[in-house]
Amino acid sequence: MEPIVQVSLDLTNIEEAVEVAKVAVESGVDWIEAGTPLLLAEGLHAVKRLRAEFPEHPIVADLKTMDGGYLEAEMMAKAGATHVVVMGVAHPATIRAVIKAAREFNIKVMGDIMAAPDKVECAKMLEANGVDYIIVHTGFDERGEAPEKSPYDDLEPVVNAVSIPVQAVGGLSLDQAAEMPKHGAPLVVVGAPLVIDNKEFKPSTNCQELKETLTNLVNKVKASKVG
């Protein structure tokens, strides 16, 4: 697939999230993600608001579903999400329930392999069960305790093990994110580097700087060849 740029709205206020999303869309970003902090703070209302503000853009609901898979996917689909995220360490029944709902409500499923003991086997299992994308994810807390950890640790073997598109998330710099298509991960996500200051989730205060940063990233990603 051609490279895609996704902005993750890892914020806790919908008004701030919408402002960041507007800048992102003006910069050429393709997909909008209602990040987990935003969903925790604003719930379905965040997805509904983003759908109203951006009727043509795919919207990813980063639910990190671990149980109640059908209901969570159904609720997000009806609110306007086009993609939902299920955890690879969830029970296989939950993964299948999310996929069942996704097929019925015409949305896509992203399988996150964060915390899986064997990332490659987890990715293969997710693909076999019918997810549409794999997320190679090094968690925020994990990186807090082990800063040397990175999606690079698992990216290549996972890309080689599956035939569906891959996304790499967690602690990547903007330059590293722009290089992801060359590593076989055409779904480029950016969020935390722009909005997390130490451990406080807040938006960039300089919209022009944010727009320039995102525009440069989009241009780099779109010029990349998928490895």
Image (tube, helix red, strand yellow):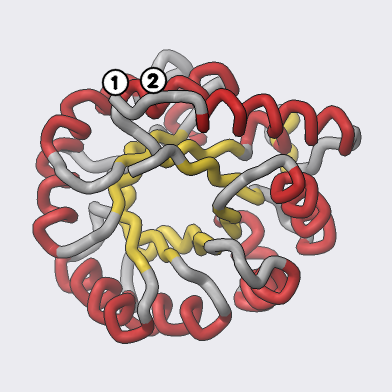
Residue 99 sits in quarter: bottom left
Q: Residue at x 49, y 19 (%)?
A: 176
Q: CA distance from mark 1 to mark 2?
A: 7 Å
Of 184 and 37, the residue lying toward us: 184
Residue 109 vs 139, above or below: the answer is below
Residue 44 vs 113, above or below: the answer is below
Q: Residue at x 82, y 36 (%)?
A: 204
Label 1 crowd (10 A; few <14 / some 14-19 / many >=20): few
- Residue farthest toward the top in the current orientation of the protein: 148
Location of mark 2 (residue): 149
**Residue 105 image position (x, y, % from top left):** 37, 83
Q: Is residue 144 visible?
A: no
Quadrant placement of the N terminus: top left
Q: Residue at x 39, y 60 (%)?
A: 85
Give, as a three-letter code, the residue at label 1: Asp
Residue 1 vs 15, above or below: the answer is above
Of 210 and 137, the residue lying toward us: 210
Give, as a three-letter code, the residue at label 2: Lys
Q: Is residue 68 visible?
A: yes
Question: Pointer 1 and pointer 2: residues touching (CB < 8 Å)?
Answer: yes
Residue 70 sits in quarter: bottom left
**Residue 191 image position (x, y, % from top left):** 62, 39
Residue 91 vs 117, above or below: the answer is below
Q: Residue at x 60, y 55 (%)?
A: 32
Q: Which mark is residue 69?
A: none
Closest to the camera, between mark 1 and mark 2, is 1
Quadrant placement of the C terminus: top left
Q: Which mark is residue 153?
A: 1
**Residue 164 image position (x, y, % from top left):** 22, 47
